[in-house]
Image (cartoon, rainbow, N blue to C red):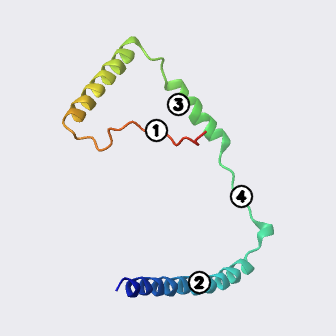
Amino acid sequence: MLEVLLGSVLAANFGMMFGLWNRLNTLRGEIKEIAGDLDLNNIEIELPDVEGIKNDLIATFADMRTPSFVDHIGGAIGAIMQAKAMKTMQDANLLQHDEVYEPPSNAV
């Protein structure tokens, strides 16, 4: 019974691979036909407006401000609240992966 199932799966696999190969061969001909119509020597590339990008960057940096004491306190309070929420979720077993990730030993 297992041999029949494996043979059927293998036959279906070869059938799908043949169909994919056939379709790719058909598309190869169409791509060559389309590529033959292109004139690759006369392609014009439009460059973006460098001055506009420069002005946008200058405006963005001009609107930025140095973080204040209140920004730092808010960040610290947010980190404490996030740690507390994660601890609550871990205690309630709501986290899917609470194991520590260990990279493979052959990783650089």
Q: Looking at the picture, which amino acid does disc 1 mark?
A: Glu
Alpha carbons under labels 4 and 2: distance apart: 35 Å
Residue 102's label in the rendered image is: 1
Q: Is residue 6 left or right of residue 31?
A: left
Q: Earlier in the sequence, mark 4 or mark 3?
A: 4
Residue to which mark 2 is pinned: 21
Residue that mark 4 sits on: 45
Residue to which mark 3 is pinned: 60
- How far apart in space, not on screen, are marks 1 and 2 (Cα)? 41 Å
User: Considering only order in the chain, which callout, 3 or 1, is on the residue closer to the N terminus?
Assistant: 3
Q: Considering the numbered disc 2 on the image, is that residue within a helix, a strand or a loop?
A: helix
Q: Is residue 84 above or below residue 42?
A: above
Residue nearest the observer in this picture, 44 or 95: 95
Query: Which mark is in front, 1 or 2?
Result: 1
Q: CA distance from mark 1 to mark 4?
A: 47 Å
In this rendering, would 14 be left or right of 89? right
Determine contact: label 1, label 2, CB under 8 Å: no
Q: In 3D space, how far apart are the residues under numbered discs 1 and 3 (Cα atoms)?
A: 40 Å
Label 4: state its secondary structure.
loop
